Amino acid sequence: MKNRLFYQSRLARPELDRAEGIYLWAKDGKRYLDGSSGAMVSNIGHSNPAVLQAMREQMEKSTFGYRLHFQTEASERLANKTAALCPEELGRVFFVSGGSEAVESTLKLARQYALTRGEAQRYKVISRMPSYHGSTLGALAVTGYAPLAAPFSPMMREMPKIPAPRAYLDGLDPDDPATGKHYADMLEQTILDEGPQTVLAFIVEPVGGASTGALVPPAGYMQRIREICDDYGVLLIHDEVMSGGGRTGKFWGAEHWGTVPDLISISKGFGGGYVPLGAMIARDDIVEAVLDAGGFAHGHTYAGNPLACAAGLAVIDEIERQDLTGNAAAMGDKLKARLNALKNRFPFIGDVRGKGLLLAFELVSDRTTMQPLPKELGAFDRLVNIAYDKGLIIYSRRTRGGISGDHFLVCPPMIVTEPQIDEIMALLTEALDEFAAETGLDKDSAA
C-alpha cells in the first residue's frame, strides 16, 4: 500500500508499538531508549499513569469547549498554576497548541501593546544568529537558521540578528562578566543602529535549544540584556519552549540568572508530549492595556482545550510530586560529567555544554581552532543513525547557522535514573566508536 503520510524527508523509521518511562518499542519488538525526550518534549517520560488518568477523567466531562462559548475548569486551573510558577509580574496566561504558536503570540501581543502606547513605529524584533523560534512565518522571521528560513525569505519580513554568545567558538572565557557584557552590548549597538524608536522586542532562549545546542549564556549576559531592554523601552521575550518546565534544573531556565522578562513562551515539556499544548505568559499591565484597547487580535481554535489543559496540569503535578526538577539538576550533573569524560576518549568532541538535562556535545576537527568536521562526513546525520540502530535516540542540528558543524543533544526524560544514564553512555560510546572507525577519526589526534 502506498504511504500517504509525509513529513520532512524520505527517512523511514519503524512503526511505534508502545512507550513507557524512557523507553519506546517498535512493532518488531526492538526497544529504543529515548535519549532526547523526542524533540525535548517527553519531560516526565511516556505513559505516566497519573497523566493518563487525568485525561480519562476529563474525557468523561468534555473534550472540547470553545473559548468564546465557555470557560473550563481545566484551563482556569492550569492558568492559575502556571502563573503561580512565574515571577509575580507575569500573571496572565494565553494557551496555544505548540511552540511556534506560543512565540507568534508573544510577537503579536508585543506589537499590539506598542500600538496602545502610541508607538506604531515599533515593529522590529531582534533575535540571535543562530537561533530557533519556530516554523511559522512570523517565528521564522526571528529564527537564525538558514536552511529553515531562507526558502521563505521573500514571504516574510526578516528581523535584525545579533551573534549568539558562543564564547567557546570565539576563544572567550564564559565565566568572565566581561564576556557577557561583550555579547550583550551587541544588542545595544543594534538597537542604536536600527533606531531605538523602531525596536519592539528582543527574543532570547535563556538556555539555547536545537540551533545552538544547549548554549549557556556567559556570566552577566542575561542581566545586561535586561538592563538594555529597560533603557530603550524594548520588551524582553524569553523563549522557554525548550528550557521551561524544569529541564534545566529550574522550572524556568532564566531562574538560573534571576532575570524576569516581559513575556514568556513555553511548550514542549509543558504538555509532556501527551497532547499538543503551549502557552504565552505576559505581564498583567500589557494584557490589560491590549484588552482595554479592544482586545487581542489573535487566537487559535484549540486554545485552552480542556483535555490538553487537564493533561498539562497533571504533568506539572507530576513534576512537583516527584521533584523532577531536582532530579533533572542531579542527573544532569552526572550526565554532563560523563559526557565531558568522553573528550578523553574522542578528541573530536570539542565542547560539552548545557544545564540540567538540557545537554549537548559538539564535534570538531581541531579543539584549538574549533574548526568543524568536514561537511561531507555528514556527522550530524550519521552519528544519529548509528546510535538509532543501536537503540539510542539522540537529536542533532548543524551548529554554525545550519550550514556546517555538528552538535548532538542528549536530553533524556527528567525521570532518568543513574543506571539508565549508564545505559545511555554505553550506547553512545558504542555509536561514537563506530562513527570514528567509519570516518577514520579514530586515527586522528585532534586534541
Image: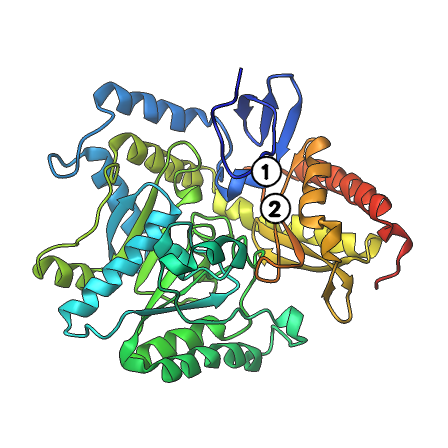
Residue 416, disc? 1
Circle 2: element type:
helix
Quadrant containing the C terminus is bottom right
Q: Residue at x 27, y 41 (%)?
A: 78
Q: CA distance from mark 2 to mark 1?
A: 7 Å
Residue contact at pointers 2 and 1, CB within 8 angstroms: yes
Q: Is residue 420 left or right of residue 181?
A: right
Judge whether residue 216 can be spotted in this image.
Answer: yes
Residue 216, disc? none
Residue pointed to by mark 2: 331
The amino acid on which the numbered mark 1 sits, given as a three-letter code, is Val
Task: Name the spot of residue 336 as percent of width and height, x first.
Answer: 66, 53
Q: Residues within 10 Å of mark 2 (few under 14, many from 20)?
A: many
Position above or below: 310 against 355: above
Of residue 198 and residue 178, the one placed in the foreground of this image is 198
The amino acid on which the numbered mark 2 sits, given as a three-letter code, is Met
Circle 1: element type:
loop
Task: Name the spot of residue 3 as percent of width and height, x first.
Answer: 52, 22
Figure disc tally: 2
Position above or below: 367 against 71: below
Which image quadrant for residue 169? bottom right
Task: Name the spot of residue 282 as percent of width and height, x first.
Answer: 26, 58
